[in-house]
Amino acid sequence: MYIFLISLVWGLFAAMLFLNLYFRIKVMKCYGILVRNKVQFDAGHIFNRQRLEKEILPKYPTHRKEIEDFVKHIHFSIRMATVLTTLITAFAAILMYFR
């Protein structure tokens, strides 16, 4: 059981590392396009959809897809990091209990 849990924690850590790298590449591609086209918005726009739709998307209608992809990738990256961190913490706590 102990070896299984250690393997699970290492596997989850590897998954978190892979997802982080994968989404960092995706985010950086979208970010590069937005920077080249001088599209500017704040972090508040990323986390507030209504504000993004009201202030930014009408300002840059030709780059709507890139903006939405960027925001979607940021949200998914944060969500996956939160889930994997929670799982790693839970399994590490279980390992401490069994030790």
Image (cartoon, rainbow, N blue to C red):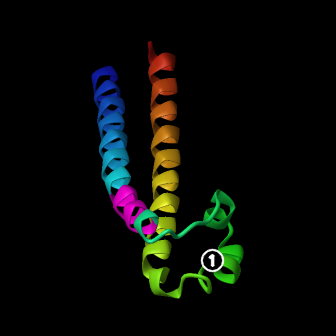
Q: Residues within 10 Å of mark 1 (few under 14, many from 20)?
A: some
First to last magenta residue range:
26-34
Using residue 78 as the reference point, say whether residue 36 is left or right of it: left
Picture layout, residue 55 above or below residue 12: below
> Residue 77's spot in the image, x, y percent?
46, 54
**Front one among 80 and 56:** 56
Q: Total label count?
A: 1
Which residue occupies 44% across, 12% down? 99
Q: Label 1 belongs to which residue?
A: 56
Helix or strand or loop: what does disc 1 sit on?
A: helix
Using residue 48 as the reference point, say whether residue 74 is left or right of it: left
> Residue 36's spot in the image, x, y percent?
40, 66
> Residue 84's spot in the image, x, y percent?
45, 43
The secondary structure that most of the magenta stretch takes on is helix
Which residue occupies 32% across, 46% down? 21
Q: Of the residues shown, which amino acid type is indicated by label 1? A: Ile
**Front one among 13 and 4:** 13
Which residue occupies 64% across, 58% down? 43
